[in-house]
Amino acid sequence: MENFFGLTLSNLEAQIGALGKEKYRARQLFRWVYNLGNLDFSEMTNIPKGLRTIFGEMFSLKTLPISQALSSRDGSIKFAFVADDGQIIESVLMPEKKRTTLCVSTQIGCRMGCRFCVTGKMGFRRNLNAAEIVGQLITVREHLKKTEKGPVTNIVFMGMGEPMDNIDNVMTALDILKDPGGLDLSYRKITLSSVGLLDGLRALDSKSAVIAISLNAADDATRSMLMPINRLYSIGKIMEFVRDFKGTKRTRITFEYILIKGVNDSLDDAKKLADLLKDIKCKINLIPYNASSYTEFETPERAQVDRFHKHLIDRYFTTIIRDSRGQDVCGACGQLGMGYLESAPDKGDTPRKKRTTSPEVTS
Ligand code: SF4
């Protein structure tokens, strides 16, 4: 049985067409499942009963089993889902005043090895398929039906994994999320965060999603130390890509900058960053790092964060400080998965220290 959440509308039309049935049935299914939120074929009353039975035998509408849903004091919820092979998939729901954002994962583990990141320490397990990516949203949506919380309005691909390292499944998931006959999410409501895998990013266009690049340093030595991928895709190459990127008038690339004490948080670093981005239409998100016993890095002083921020504002950059959400429930990517690995040491592939302090934030 095929997982429905991994099928684009055209995949579905092709499968229904191959049965000798009307292709518009695919649109009806998309509307029932994504638009009306009905996950029971037998209730899709504008489809003939016999066909509903056939669809029920062909497609699965099973959501991801939730093994944990940890609510944070700040209102965010960290979910751990169990995939069919027993691996843990993480998402974080972040309600705000005007929107509710779901941060989804695209891989289990990650091969980018960013030194500040818990997921990076896990190593790479596997890519998520499109059904598992879309399934995170559908499962959370079902969960929210039982609560007072509003619907998910925005999606960020910033959970476990590097989206551009799993580009085919991510593109399929984007197609499904944006389909006007289904969830109909505008590309402006979807942010795709990348360390800067340029081959993947070049395959995107300005209407694929909002692009966020995890920069974290304005010089190659610091960035390569924090993010080994910088040896392949240096800051210079990323800037070249950003300058060439054909966006709409409103398109602005977002740069994420995790501030780490004594590593990249000085006023000098702020000046270098401002110089680097001075002719680029962009937005900067500053994310103060949360120390974790999984890594050697420390949280920056608040006064230092404010100084860094002020310098960028004084240089007319749109800059916000994004404090990480759900710190009391392991809100950063990889932390729940890491917890599972600690209780199942045969699955771990990197030596780990016991956590003694609050978790950290990752891109
Ligand atoms: S920060 Fe993102 S890309 Fe880097 S190791 Fe972590 S999950 Fe992978």
Image (cartoon, grey):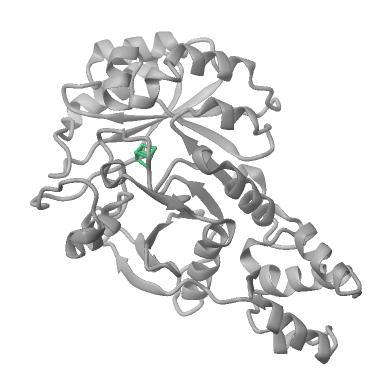
Q: Residue at x 55, y 27 (%)?
A: 253
Q: Is residue 211 left or right of residue 172?
A: left
Seen at 62% across and 53% down, the residue is 173
**Residue occupying image coordinates x 28% and y 43%:** 361
Quadrant holding ligand 1?
A: top left
Q: How many marks?
A: 0
Q: Position of residue 304 (x, y in %)?
A: 20, 24
In percent of width and height, residue 2 lies at: 64, 71
Q: Residue furthest front?
A: 346
Of the pair 201 and 250, the residue shown nearer to us:
201
Give the quadrant of residue 161. Answer: top left
- In the depicted structure, whether residue 73 falls above or below residue 300: below
Q: Position of residue 112 (x, y in %)?
A: 37, 35
Say which quadrant the C terminus sits in: top left
**In the rendered view, does 213 fall on the left or right side of 6?**
left
Quadrant of res 50: bottom right
For the point 37% across and 68% down, the residue is 86
In this view of the protein, can residue 241 be seen by the observer?
yes
The residue nearer to you, when weighing 10 against 284, is 10
Location of the N terminus (image quadrant): bottom right
Locate residue 240 relative to residue 221 in the image: left or right. Answer: right
Residue 108 visible in the shown view: no
Q: Quadrant of residue 299?
A: top left
User: What is the x, y in percent for residue 10?
Assistant: 79, 58
